[in-house]
Image (spheres, rainbow, N blue to C red):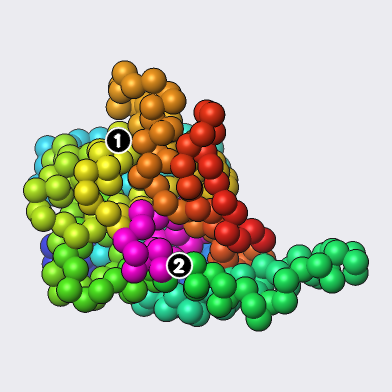
Amino acid sequence: MQPIDHHFNALLQEAWGNLRPLLANPEIREIMVNGPNVIWVEQQGLMHPVPLEFSTQAAWNLIQILVCLRDQGTDAQDHGVLLDVALPQLRISVVRQPIAVRGHALCIRKHAQTSRPLTDYLTAGPRDVLAGVVASAPAVMAQAVQPANEVAPSALEILVPWVEGRRNILVSGATSSGKTSFLNALLALLPADERVITIEDTCELHLDQANCVVFEANESLAISMRDLVRQSLRFRPDRIVVGEVRGKEAFDLLQAMNTGHAGCMGTLHANSAEDALLRLEQMVLLQGSQWPHAAIKQQIAACIDGVVHLHRLRGKRQIAQMIEIRGYHNGNYDIEQKMSA
């Protein structure tokens, strides 16, 4: 992520126009421009429209500034029909007309300014999940649900030993399910004397480690996530943390885990904890490995110790499932369900 030139920054601040109050509101996490004067926001986990004017011309002006910011210092020249830009504290995705049929569309995501402690995350999440189950279930089913005040301690009793025991952990979930925030909460448990290497497409992780190196992929410089995972092995890491595993770097991350680099963490998109393992298989296959599928599954089972799956329920980002991978037998992962909502 390049620093913003003073001139460009002044132009950008003007181009935000009527979106400025939304950007300044700490309760708003995402701003979505669906077309001219059609603005939605995610506020405290829930989406709702806001009555603001943001015309086609205003969107066009903003897009032109974003194209310039993305291309500064490079020879890239296009019109920003599809555009992704990382700015300090913001990640912006653009689809321009005519691809966006109803008008230029933007999705502006604000990075979390502070990290929530793991205790807060767990207390708010699983209790609310169970409350929702009880509210929607018949009375006889509700009686079988574990009391809410027992959930958070049991989750902590699993997660803290996983982190302290240098287990390799994946955090899975859909878009905007809270994966990065939860990973930040796990990172807060790391011993202060460990050396941590973080690798991301867009820097969103917050570490208090004194001995920490932060890597960010850069498409314009042809530096991929896979390049950085490989390079991190030469930086004497105690732990490698990948902000989002989404491609060929999955193979190299597994190789790192399988060659003495314990305590690695990463996030990925998936529909369940079990599906996260299948997604990891697919990403390893992307790099063209000639390994038999069974061998890939065996290595995943040997490397990944646990998966925490998150979802968003009624605007709250919560733990939905936790599994421990105990091995691989007869073509299947040996999985123990540690927690399921």
Nearer the observer, 317 or 42? 317
Residue type at tag 2:
Leu
Depth check: give the residue in front, 300 or 48: 300
Per the image, is 227 magenta?
Answer: no
Side (left or right) of 235 relative to 247: left
Residue in the foreground of this view, choosing between 96 and 216: 216
Which of the two labelled residues, at mark 2 and mark 1, occupies the earlier sequence position?
A: 2
For disc 1, the marked residue is 251
Tell me what residue is drawn at x 48 percent, y 79 percent.
119
Work out whether residue 257 can be spotted: yes
Asked if the magenta segment contains residue 175, the reply would be: yes
The residue shown at (9%, 53%) is 235
- Mark 2 closeness class: few <14, some 14–19, many ≥20 residues within 10 Å: many
Would you say residue 21 is visible in this rendering?
Answer: no
Q: Position of residue 47 (x, y in %)?
A: 60, 64
Judged left or right of residue 178, residue 3 is left
Of residue 295 and residue 78, the one placed in the foreground of this image is: 295
Frontmost of labels 2 and 1 is 2
Quadrant in which residue 126 is drawn:
bottom right
- Residue 99: horizontal and vertical position, in percent? 47, 34
Q: Which residue is mark 2?
A: 159
Q: Which residues are magenta?
A: 161-184
